[in-house]
């Protein structure tokens, strides 16, 4: 069965609740049972049930989260293990929650920065379609009066314009939309689609620069948090 990782907002919610439970010094199983009683979405409930099962088998919180790394990420498990060993579990959970919130803020800034060029691209695409559908036909009759053959590029533009006006674009576009909807709504494909969109954004130089900055900032902040928790540099670089 394919395991889907919790989103950033979902992880913030889960670890913020865990931080509050540890700070209140509640027994771990009792705290997880309380979290399960809160209204959550199915993915969070499934993760909490798996966490409770692992803890009920005698595992520590750090070992249980390490086993659940496909759901909660690879970094948090060793981080909690280090916090438990140092007796600073509440501080580690608080630091991790703050780290996730900072990443969420950075991600929102990245989306806002990327929205402007994407909006311009969409507007330019619609303008190009409008030119091909309504403006190019106005000149097509004029081109036909020329005694010389038209350049290849001009012939391509006229053919594309005729195809758009004849509705020949509708079938492939409709098939593409239906296929995309089936892929997106298929269980487990959310992360794959997200990866494809991320790669597509990286092909645009301005957005690629912003994405790279976001990635490196995320790596540096997490590495600093791991080192601060007492994890060796060599081990931290592998997480």
Image: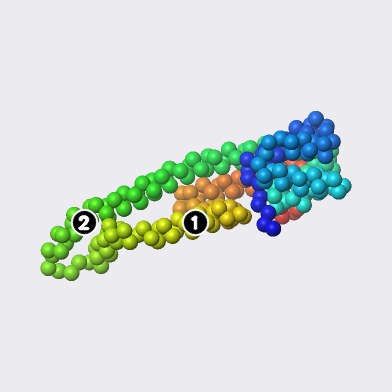
In the image shown, does 50 or 83 lie closer to the viewer?
50
113 is higher (above) or lower (below) than 167: above
Residue 81 seen in render = no
Residue 1 in the image, given as x and y percentages of width and height: 69, 58
- Quadrant housing residue 195: bottom right
Determine which of the numbered discs, if any, sits on residue 219 in the image.
Answer: none
Question: Left of 87 or right of it: where is 137?
Answer: left
Instruction: Pick out the residue farthest to the right.
Output: 58
- Quadrant housing residue 14: top right
9 is higher (above) or lower (below) than 25: below
Mark 2 closeness class: few <14, some 14–19, many ≥20 residues within 10 Å? some
Give the residue displayed 41% in from the left and 57% down from the top. 174
Give the residue displayed 13% in from the left and 65% down from the top. 146
Instruction: Pick out the residue farthest to the top.
Output: 24
Give the residue displayed 27% in from the left and 57% down from the top. 165
Determine which of the numbered discs, if any, sits on residue 180 in the image.
Answer: 1
Question: Left of 101 or right of it: where is 46?
Answer: right
Q: Secondary structure at mark 1?
A: helix
**Of marks 2 and 1, which one's residue comes earlier in the chain?**
2
Marks 1 and 2: in contact by CB < 8 Å? no
Residue 117 in the image, given as x and y percentages of width and height: 42, 46
Residue 238 seen in render = yes
In the image shown, does 101 or 156 lie closer to the viewer?
156
138 is higher (above) or lower (below) than 149: above
Residue 234 in the image, given as x and y percentages of width and height: 75, 54
Q: Secondary structure at mark 2?
A: helix
Q: Which residue is mark 2?
A: 137
In the image shown, does 1 or 69 lie closer to the viewer?
1
Question: Left of 22 or right of it: where is 2?
Answer: left
Give the residue displayed 72% in from the left and 55% down from the top. 238
Q: CA distance from mark 2 to mark 1?
A: 32 Å
Residue 91 in the image, given as x and y percentages of width and height: 76, 35
């Amino acid at each position: 069965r394919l395991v889907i990782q919790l989103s950033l907002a979902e992880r913030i919610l889960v670890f913020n609740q865990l931080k509050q439970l540890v700070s209140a010094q509640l027994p771990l199983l009792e705290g997880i049972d309380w979290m399960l009683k809160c209204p959550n979405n199915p993915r969070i409930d499934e993760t909490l049930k798996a966490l409770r099962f692992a803890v009920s088998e005698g595992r520590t919180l750090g070992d249980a989260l390490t086993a659940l790394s496909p759901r909660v990420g690879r970094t948090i498990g060793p981080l909690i293990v280090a916090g438990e060993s140092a007796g600073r579990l509440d501080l580690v959970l608080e630091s991790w929650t703050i780290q996730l919130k900072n990443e969420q803020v950075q991600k929102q800034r990245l989306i806002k920065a990327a929205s402007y060029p994407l909006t311009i691209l969409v507007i330019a695409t619609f303008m190009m379609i409008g030119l091909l559908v309504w403006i190019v036909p106005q000149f097509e009759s004029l081109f036909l009066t020329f005694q010389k053959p038209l350049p290849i590029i001009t012939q391509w533009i006229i053919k594309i314009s005729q195809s758009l006006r004849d509705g020949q674009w509708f079938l492939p576009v409709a098939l593409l939309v239906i296929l995309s909807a089936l892929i997106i709504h298929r269980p487990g494909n959310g992360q794959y689609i997200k990866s494809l969109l991320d790669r597509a954004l990286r092909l645009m130089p301005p957005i690629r620069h912003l994405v790279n900055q976001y990635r490196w900032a995320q790596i540096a902040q997490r590495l600093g948090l791991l080192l601060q928790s007492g994890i060796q540099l060599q081990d931290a670089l592998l997480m």
